[in-house]
Image (spheres, rainbow, N blue to C red):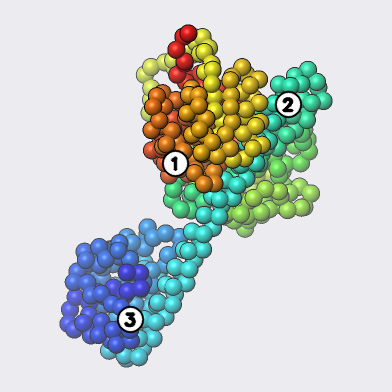
């Protein structure tokens, strides 16, 4: 399908003649009888389109324009347009040149060799686009695999740091070391998450999880992520907020990411003892948030580039900035997915920068915010836990945390051992890795669910894979929850509190 040229010439013999010429040159062609058929065939795949200019006002221009407007980034559909003798300057041809992009004009009558040469050029150009698509796909697969592989060692590091804090709660030096490692693991985790977001956005696999979100809660999270870095450079951040909290209908994690990326960028490009001002206000149904610094500023020609993926700029010291160069690009893309925007401005180098985020607010609410619920009594801990992971460091460190929290915990390092452990003593909770060699976590979970009385076991998938298809596969395999490495032990304990309890003796 992707190697064929679609032909639309509704009058005369141009279509069958063109198809015959292409066939003699071993080029696959498909004659469309109408613009509607052209639209349908484009959805099935095509290397390009050969159309007569008289087809444009009969619906072809609208079909091609709509297809071009929504084609993926790798695609630039080649079009050969057959014009009447002396008609290459007609209004409809000028409209086609302006609106259809990758267009080649051939004036009729067309020399056979010229048509064949143009068709071969079209196919070569489309082949290069297909190669770019394949490279993009492989890059996305690599980033996803890289994220998984990086998350695997992060998990035991994070767990071991938590163990340090519990083993030596009163030793200040240990706590300082623990805090350093914890901050760096958190930073590395954010870098991994950003890489995966790039892959998901470019492949169209990211979706927003909208809910009612209070801007105050978003800002609290942003402060947790950014204020320590600002303090390290003695940068003062001033906040000016609306008198009442503002509700958004948004994906809370992505809004935090938008604002945190931009505030982190301001901190990076602001000198020691600098100032950053964060202001927020309501304007025509939108929440506007300004992040203004007195840092290195921007040249006018650099402003359009800073939102490009992997774009790097120079810091205060003149060195290239650390990081991946994707934070601002992700911030703008996530804002646009919410129906908002991110704009940058600067008076020039050395004069600071201002970024303005605009997000639509939620519909007006009539009910007052609900009061926080009374603290519920802590749920009884499940007495038996099974940790399953082929990474022994990850399994053993998590086992140690469970033991320190009072659980009766066992470990298994592969799927077969997990099955044997469940048959030997039915646990109330299983925390299992997915990417094990041999019998992976999906198959192990399915087999466990088939065992007698195993339906009541709570199973948590603990994995480096965070894509939507991985989450759906875990549910289909019988897991109750899907957590992404590295995970806070407190999050596992919170879920464990809802695990079924053993019957009283």
Q: Seen in the image, is 1 located left or right of residue 355?
A: left
Measuring 32% from the left and 91% from the top, which residue is drawn there?
A: 111
Q: Which of marks 3 and 2 is nearer the N terminus?
A: 3
Work out whether residue 453 can be spotted.
Answer: yes
Residue 402 left/right relative to 51: right
Disc 2 crowd, CA 10 A, few/some/many (<14, 14-19, 20+):
some
Residue 101 marker: none
Where is residue 20? Give x, y as percent: 25, 85
Kindly identify the residue that appears in the image at 44 percent across and 12 percent down: 503
Which numbered mark, 1 or 2, is in the foreground of this view? 1
Q: Position of residue 328 (x, y in %)?
A: 58, 47
Specify the label residue 443 is tagged with: 1
Do callouts 1 and 2 mark residues in contact (Cβ within 8 Å)? no
Residue occupying the point 39% across, 82% down: 120
Q: Is residue 367 above or below residue 92?
A: above
Q: What element carries label 1?
A: helix
Image-based side of 467 in relation to 398, left or right: left
Residues marked 3 and 2 touching at CB (< 8 Å): no
User: How much space separates mark 1 and mark 2, taking CA atoms?
Assistant: 34 Å
Label 3: which secondary element:
loop
Occupied quadrant, residue 121 = bottom left
**Residue 164, label in figure:** 2
Do we see residue 495 in this rendering?
A: no
Q: Looking at the picture, does residue 323 appear above or below residue 504?
A: below
Disc on res. 27: 3
The spot of residue 282 in percent (x, y) is: 48, 31
Find the distance from the CA under tag 3 to the CA under tag 2.
68 Å
* Residue nearest the viewer, comparing 301 with 30: 30
């Amino acid at each position: 399908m992707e190697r064929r040229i679609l032909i639309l010439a509704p009058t005369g013999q141009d279509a069958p003649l063109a198809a015959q010429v292409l066939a003699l040159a071993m080029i696959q062609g498909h004659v469309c009888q109408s613009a509607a058929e052209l639209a349908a065939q484009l959805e099935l795949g095509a290397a390009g389109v050969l159309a007569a200019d008289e087809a444009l006002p009969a619906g072809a221009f609208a079909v091609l324009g709509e297809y071009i407007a929504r084609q993926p980034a790798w695609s630039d559909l080649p079009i050969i347009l057959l014009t009447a003798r002396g008609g290459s300057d007609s209004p409809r041809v000028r409209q086609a040149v302006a609106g259809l992009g990758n267009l080649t004009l051939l004036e009729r009558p067309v020399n056979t060799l010229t048509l064949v040469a143009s068709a071969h050029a079209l196919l070569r150009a489309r082949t290069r686009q297909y190669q770019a698509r394949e490279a993009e796909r492989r890059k996305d697969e690599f980033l996803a695999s890289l994220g998984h592989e990086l998350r695997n060692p992060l998990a035991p590091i994070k767990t071991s740091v938590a163990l340090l804090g519990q083993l030596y709660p009163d030793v200040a030096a240990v706590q300082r070391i623990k805090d350093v490692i914890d901050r760096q693991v958190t930073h590395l985790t954010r870098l991994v998450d950003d890489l995966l977001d790039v892959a998901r956005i470019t492949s169209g696999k990211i979706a927003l999880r909208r809910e009612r979100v209070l801007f105050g809660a978003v800002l609290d999270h942003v402060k947790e992520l950014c204020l320590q870095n600002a303090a390290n450079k003695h940068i003062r951040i001033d906040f000016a907020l609306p008198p009442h909290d503002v509700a958004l209908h948004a994906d809370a994690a992505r809004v935090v990411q938008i604002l945190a990326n931009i505030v982190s960028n301001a901190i990076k490009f602001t000198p020691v003892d600098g100032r950053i001002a964060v202001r927020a206000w309501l304007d025509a149904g939108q929440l506007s948030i300004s992040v203004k610094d007195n840092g290195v500023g921007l040249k006018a020609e650099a402003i359009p580039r800073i939102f490009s993926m992997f774009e790097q700029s120079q810091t205060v010291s003149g060195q290239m900035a650390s990081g991946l160069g994707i934070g601002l690009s992700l911030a703008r893309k996530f804002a646009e997915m919410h129906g908002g925007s991110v704009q940058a401005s600067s008076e020039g180098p050395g004069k600071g920068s201002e970024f303005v985020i605009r997000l639509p607010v939620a519909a007006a609410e009539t009910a007052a915010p609900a009061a926080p619920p009374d603290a519920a009594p802590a749920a009884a801990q499940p007495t038996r836990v099974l940790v399953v992971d082929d990474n022994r460091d990850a399994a053993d460190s998590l086992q140690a945390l469970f033991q320190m929290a009072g659980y009766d915990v066992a470990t298994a390092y592969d799927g077969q051992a997990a099955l044997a452990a469940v048959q030997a003593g039915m646990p109330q909770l299983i925390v299992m890795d997915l990417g094990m060699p041999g019998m992976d976590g999906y198959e192990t979970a399915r087999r466990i669910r088939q065992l007698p009385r195993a339906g009541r076991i709570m199973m948590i998938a603990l994995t480096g894979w965070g894509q939507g298809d991985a989450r759906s596969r875990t549910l289909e395999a019988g897991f109750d929850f899907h957590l992404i490495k590295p995970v806070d032990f407190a999050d596992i304990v919170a879920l464990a509190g809802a695990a079924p309890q053993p019957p009283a003796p």
